[in-house]
Amino acid sequence: MDVNFQFDWQAAIASLPHLLTGIPWTLLISFGGLAIGFLIGIIFGLLRISPLRLLRWPATVYIEIFRGTPVLVQVLFIFYGLPQLIGGPINAVVAGIAAIALNAGAYISEIVRGGVQSIEKGQREAGLSLGLSRTDTFRYIIWPQALRRMIPALGNQGIVSIKDTSLFSVIGVGELVRQGQVYIATTFTALEVYLMVALLYLAITLSLSFALRLLERKGLVGQ
Amino acid sequence: MNDSQQDSTAPIVTMEKVNKYFGSLHVMQDIDLEIAAGEVVVIVGASGSGKSTLIRCVNGLEEFQSGRIIVDGNELTPHGKGGKSLQTIRTEVGMVFQQFNLFPHLSVHANVTLAPEKVRGLNNAKAREIADRLLERVGISNQADKYPSQLSGGQQQRVALARALAMEPRLMLFDEPTSALDPEMIGEVLDAMRELANEGMTMMIVTHEMGFAREVADRVIFVHDGRIVEEGTPQEVFDHPQHERTQAFLSRVLKH
Ligand SMILES: Nc1ncnc2c1ncn2[C@@H]1O[C@H](COP(=O)(O)OP(=O)(O)O)[C@@H](O)[C@H]1O
Ligand SMILES: [Mg+2]
């Protein structure tokens, strides 16, 4: 070990303006992907508990494939593989958002399924017995309660997906890790820069945790 | 839509040769039953004899495999193919459950206004008016802004009663409404039900409260292994049971 080595705070601080240019891309890919993934998760999570087997099994196939393969392989497949099929290039940011959406969507489907199934069957019976349609029973009674129970697991998935976007430096998206690599290539200050990169991820994920905790606490009334 | 409303002598509930199975378990065996408007019918029987299943068939929470059920002129057919008439029946039949089944994410007030607004299409002001009146009637008006979890069991069950009454049902079903309550809260729920019976509501009640049954029932039905074994006035069934199953059941429940 080099006992003379000094952690260079100035170099760390100096890298910040460059690193910050990666943040919008990291946020765009994670939250864009998560938003679409949430929609996918609602649709496939509900298909998964459909009484019709014909609707259940495509959902199961989708979920198993995208949970069972690495998100890195998924994005490589979309970015390098798909263009061969469709005969044109795919934008790297679009590929990143798609990979997060499909991957998080598979996990969120399971979160949605578990959340909906966790609601006591008496709730549905009470709604139906009042004359509410099955759709209204779901919309006004089951779903609001299920959504509240899903918040911790959704937060967890959000954090995982935000961190997953760091892999997309390999397809050249100018996100946080990519900006770090570019910066280090000229300054050779890997220790300082990667520490800053790590702290920036932490800032994003902690903000999300905090926001969700507020949401959960607001939702506690009546539970 | 509703043939029977012109004909006030027609029964509100008619069950003809209704059979139901859970897998190979024959839980309702050739059930024939008629309930007149304004009648209060108490259903008694051992645990597992099929009492809940019987009343849950009336509002289509359970399907049956053969026979027919007509509720206020609307017919339910086997295998849950009620369609439009199932929906109509559910808006006209209220139900109170053993476990209350209040909506925990909604205030007491919103629990009561939900169905009038979404099913009857009432505006919020009109629905609130109905809810205020019913909550006052069951003695909960000062708790209307609370959530169900902030109420005692007895209060929750009275809210559940108000919630069902807000749809102005023609028939009320009760499935052991006091069985999940602490003993000191049973009375307040039975009082509210007694009041409803006195006002002429048609009621089907599954209960183990024999004193209450004797007092409010026009007719008592004893169910054993999915069959109606005996029925009659409370005096007939409780004081002079004809069937040995009824005698055995009564000697067991009246002992404690
Ligand atoms: N969903 C179900 N699936 C299978 N068996 C059931 C179901 N519900 C009730 N049963 C059975 O049907 C019989 C009658 O049940 P139930 O109507 O609940 O009786 P009771 O209300 O008189 O206690 C019991 O043997 C019970 O175990
Ligand atoms: Mg029962």
Image (cartoon, coloured by chain):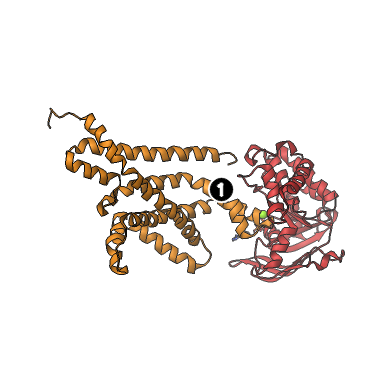
Q: Residue at x 62, y 55 (%)?
A: A137
Chain letter of disc 1?
Answer: A
Which quarter shows the C terminus of chain A? Answer: top right
Is A111 positioned to the left or the right of A133 in the image? left
Which quarter shows the N terminus of chain A? Answer: top left
**Which chain shows up in red?**
B
Residue nearest the viewer, comparing B97 with A196: A196
Q: Residues within 10 Å of mark 1 (few under 14, many from 20)?
A: many
Q: Amino acid at mark 1?
A: Gln
Task: Determine whether the beta carbon of the residue marked 1 sits less than 8 angstroms from the nearest atom of ligand 1.
Answer: no
Above or below residue A23? Residue A126 is below
Q: Residue at x 64, y 55 (%)?
A: A125
Residue nearest the viewer, comparing B146 with A195: A195
Which residue is under mark 1?
A: A145
Examine the image and state in which quarter residue A82 appears.
Answer: bottom left
**Ligand 1 quarter of the rendering:** bottom right
Above or below residue A112? Residue B32 is below
For mark 1, give the secondary structure.
helix
Above or below residue A11? Residue B107 is below
Examine the image and state in which quarter residue A222 appears.
Answer: top right
Residue B152 pos. (x, y %): 67, 38
Find chain A in the image and tell me its colour: orange
Q: Can residue B245 be seen in the rendering of this structure? A: no
Is A195 positioned to the left or the right of B200 in the image? left
Q: Residue at x 76, y 48 (%)?
A: B126
